[in-house]
Image: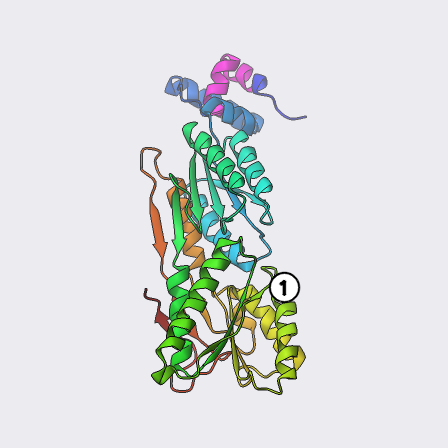
């Protein structure tokens, strides 16, 4: 049978309320000798404090809530690792909720974390461009949560009034196109997720705008072509299916559309592109170049190694934890995270640097 708080109070010779204030870390502190007596009694009996009682006594818990789209995605797993390490160093534990990009589930997660009196909530992942009502509701919930003493931070696109960690998606996408042009790629197609997913749209739009800009210049960029965008699910399997269909049409053109460079808006989607090329017999990068975005750890095991845009995902998670656990008196801050192009074997390297060469993205 579990030891009760009343047993601890009786052994220490104090009231139940006094024992509760000591062991549940209330803001009201008894005398030092009484505190020591209660703690000694608890240790002797093996008493384990009740987390709910502690939350009531302190109006908070030593918990941080993390909301992600899908923990199976290495992008979010790496962010979670960075956030959890930073939270643990601050004496906090992390609670996790997955939304699978459902705005209702995201709002439900915020409500649940608020009801559990977490000290902070971090929302990691792309914002949606629609419906606007879902964003308005999320902002309302987060505002109420901060009004009651919590702190909110976001990773991805910011929301007005809250601290955020913002990756340089657009500048990274533009720099990737410039580097691929420099090493000889001339025909491009973008593989993107749904239009309502803002991270996908930001990256895809920047990819295409940079290709069009160089195509209009001519001269050293003569022959630059942009094929129509391939829109799929924001997943490995979605990209696989979309590119498999594209490669079948390319094959019907008797190779006139080759060589081709596929720009995927995430590394997970790029892995699907690589698989589609392999299964359809299109050598990479000789017939099809492939590039991704994020530089997830899974890329260590891919063959050929994947050209991508590197983001320090673990440090992004750590920075979000620092913002969320900052004193409530601090104003909201936005921290920009730079993007770095990494050229590897999935794209042409002739005329350019060697494998793994990194190029800092600029506007």
Task: Tell whether position 335 is magenta.
Answer: no
Residue position marked by numbered label 1 in the rendering = 238
Residue 326 screen position, x and y as percent: 36, 39
Which residue is more in the foreground, 236 or 217?
A: 217
Q: Measuring 38% from the left and 86% from the top, which residue is drawn there?
A: 351
Which residue is more in the foreground, 208 or 270?
A: 208
Query: Which quadrant is the N terminus positioned in?
Result: top right
Q: Measuring 58% from the left and 52% from the top, which residue is drawn there?
A: 70
**Residue 173, quarter of the rendered image:** bottom left
Q: Measuring 55% from the left and 14% from the top, which residue is drawn there?
A: 10
Residue 185 screen position, x and y as percent: 45, 81
Residue 53 showing in the rendered view: yes
State the extent of the magenta-drawn residues as a range: 8-24
Left or right of 100: which side holds 199?
left
Which residue is more in the foreground, 360 or 43?
A: 360
**Residue 46, quarter of the rendered image:** top right
């Amino acid at each position: 049978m579990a030891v009760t708080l009343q047993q601890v109070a009786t052994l220490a010779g104090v009231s139940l309320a006094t024992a509760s204030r000591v062991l549940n870390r209330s803001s009201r502190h008894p005398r030092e000798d009484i505190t020591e007596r209660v703690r000694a009694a608890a240790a002797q009996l093996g008493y384990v404090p009740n987390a709910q009682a502690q939350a009531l006594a302190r109006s908070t818990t030593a918990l941080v809530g993390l909301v992600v789209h899908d923990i199976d995605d290495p992008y979010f797993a790496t962010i979670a690792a960075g956030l959890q390490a930073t939270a643990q160093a601050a004496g906090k534990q992390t609670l996790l909720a997955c939304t699978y990009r459902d705005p209702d589930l995201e709002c439900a997660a915020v409500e649940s974390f608020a009801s559990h009196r977490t000290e902070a909530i971090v929302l990691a992942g792309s914002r949606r461009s629609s419906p606007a009502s879902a964003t308005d509701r999320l902002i309302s919930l987060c505002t109420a949560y901060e009004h009651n003493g919590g702190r909110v931070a976001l990773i991805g696109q910011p929301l007005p009034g809250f601290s955020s960690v913002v990756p340089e998606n657009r500048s990274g996408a533009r720099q990737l196109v410039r580097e691929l042009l420099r090493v000889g790629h001339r025909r491009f197609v973008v593989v993107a997720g749904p239009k309502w997913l803002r991270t996908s749209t930001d990256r895809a739009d920047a990819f295409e705008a940079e290709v069009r800009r160089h195509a209009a210049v001519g001269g050293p960029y003569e022959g630059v072509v942009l094929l129509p965008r391939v829109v799929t699910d924001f997943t490995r399997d979605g990209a696989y299916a979309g590119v498999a269909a594209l490669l079948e049409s390319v094959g019907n053109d008797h190779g006139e559309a080759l060589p081709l460079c596929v720009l995927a808006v995430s590394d997970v989607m790029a892995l699907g592109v690589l698989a589609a090329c392999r299964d359809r017999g299109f050598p990479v990068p000789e017939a099809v170049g492939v590039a991704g975005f994020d530089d997830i750890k899974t890329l260590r095991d891919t063959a050929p190694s994947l050209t991508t845009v590197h983001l320090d995902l673990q440090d992004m998670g750590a920075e979000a934890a620092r913002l969320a656990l900052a004193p409530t008196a601090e104003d909201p801050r936005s921290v920009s995270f730079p993007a770095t192009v990494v050229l590897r074997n999935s794209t042409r390297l002739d005329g350019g640097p060697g494998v793994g060469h990194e190029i800092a993205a600029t506007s």
